[in-house]
Image (cartoon, helix red, strand yellow):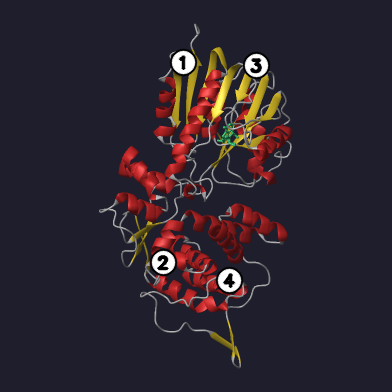
Amino acid sequence: MSNRKMRPGPNAPSRKPRTRRTGPGLRRGPSRPTGPTSRRLAYAAIEAYLSRGAFVGHVLADQMQRGDIDRRDRSLATELANGVVRRRATLETILDSYLRRPAEELETGLRALLMLGAYQLLLLESVPPHAAVHETVGVAHQIGMPRWAGFLNAVLRTLQSDLTDEMTATLASDTIPLNGRNDDPAVRARRVNKPLLPDPEENQAAYLAAAFSYPEWITARWLELSGWDEAVRLCNWFNSPGMMGLRVNLLRTDREKVLDVLRTAGVEATEGAFPESIRLPGTIRVEDIPGFAEGWFSVQDESAMHAARLLDPKVGESIWDVCAAPGGKTAHMAELISCEGRIFSTDVDAGRLQQVEGNIRRLGLRAIEIMQVSADLSDVPQRLFDAVLVDVPCSNSGVLGKRPEARWRMEPDHLRELAVTQRRLLAAAMAHAKPRGRVVYSTCSMFPDENAELVRDVLIRQDIWRIEKEQIHVPGQPGDGSYQALLVRNTDS
Ligand SMILES: C[S@@+](CC[C@H](N)C(=O)[O-])C[C@H]1O[C@@H](n2cnc3c(N)ncnc32)[C@H](O)[C@@H]1O
């Protein structure tokens, strides 16, 4: 940790922050709660994310296991930690206006607290501003860093003084988009007293990147592919709580029964597009729902169910799931053929293959052979299959709302490397299909160079395959984004 002296930036008040005198000569911060509070939990997760790239969900789960934390604290901690990571670029851009040096140069813990406080002030309507500041400053005391308290208090109070309660649909350098809402696709932005974001009239990609928090190369791509209105819609939708999809295991139960169980648990569930699919309006802890341990259902977005549905596996067929882990689509295919056939499930990742095993055990599925393979697939037995699913690793640009970190983990260079793998995997899938065999190439990406362009590029070099069907599922309509192409090997080859 650096011990450099911190000074608020030009926007911060010069007066000393007030402290409460609680005894002769004794200065103390806000009163100390007895247990870990939601903000302290959130702080730990954000600090771990900033300092060592930890997944906030993992840190929170670990912390929550250790103590008796009530449901409201858990849910606020999760909202805060996920929100800060998701809206990281917005918070950093805005905070930079209130600091003498970039937020990145501050001690990591202090930066985490500034972001935590700013998130509540700017983007969380449910927290009153005084509580946002007071409780965040309180964390500095709880974690034994009282020297941060004055600085934090000064910066957050100055930011607070620049906020208005006016909400608008106009996007400008002085309006900060709030998080999206599942029940309303319209953008709502908070007006502030001065420009804190880039001007969208001058640079649309930079504005969207800072205002909604995405890497600028992604917002530039969306603008290029779909224009301003669709880019704004995507930015807003991936910042909404999102829906959740369940796939009912029809070998164990029926959809009505799972819908009943969910409704009894107070979850507003509705039927999805497939006989096995259910849509939930938000995310839930499935482990708490009766029937999960018994294998009645799995978490799977409808956009992902389209892959197995398009391949349309038949009873008695031999099927290869090339990139199988953690097993969502392997299990879906096994359920569709009532485990009557053979599914060969491979992946490079041994740890993730254990998840496949766990899932098929919980779901009570049979007829699945699991094998770890090398990245070049040279150790795959020389067998031919009736149907092959190749659900390749991709940019995840169709599922950016799922994990708060997802948008920050992708780099354009990484995409170029992925394209090489994607081509190789598709070529291997095609090489292992019988005459008249089918291959489904599937991604959760929205980028044509991972989807339609890549498939055409692989197919152009041969004439025994044709594209039978292609489908793209646009994020927010109603679930995540995905792409699938069904390729069929010509009969006379
Ligand atoms: C999109 S995920 C698959 C999700 C899976 N189909 C499901 O529905 O649960 C992509 C998977 O590809 C695997 N993978 C990456 N390179 C691979 C390769 N060369 N051969 C096989 N699998 C690979 C990754 O380990 C990862 O598990």
Residue type at tag 1: Trp
Q: Which residue is mark 1?
A: 465
Q: What is the tally of numbered marks visible in this picture? A: 4
Q: Position of residue 420 (x, y in %)?
A: 47, 32
**Residue 475 in view in this figure:** no
Residue type at tag 2: Pro
Q: What residue sits 39% from the left and 64% below the top?
A: 94
Q: Quadrant of residue 307?
A: top right
In the image, 296 versus 10, the foreground residue is 10
Q: Secondary structure at mark 4?
A: helix
Q: Secondary structure at mark 2?
A: loop
| Marks 2 and 3, how far apart at CA | 61 Å
Residue type at tag 4: Val
| Marks 1 and 4, how far apart at CA | 61 Å
**Which is more foreground, mark 1 or mark 4?**
1
> In the rendered view, does 120 fall on the left or right side of 140?
left
| Marks 3 and 1, how far apart at CA | 24 Å
Q: Which residue is mark 4?
A: 139
Q: How dense is the environment of label 1, judged by Cα within 10 Å: few (below 14), some, or many (20 and up)?
A: many
Quadrant of the image for the N terminus? bottom right
Q: Position of residue 316 (x, y in %)?
A: 66, 15
Ligand 1 is within 8 Å of the C-beta of the residue at disc 4: no
Residue type at tag 3: Val
**Which is more foreground, mark 3 or mark 1?**
1
> In the rendered view, does 143 fall on the left or right side of 478?
right
In the image, 7 versus 32, the foreground residue is 7
Q: Are marks 1 and 4 in contact (CB under 8 Å)?
A: no
**Which is more foreground, mark 2 or mark 3?**
2
Q: Which residue is mark 3?
A: 315
**Between disc 2 and disc 4, whose residue precedes?**
2
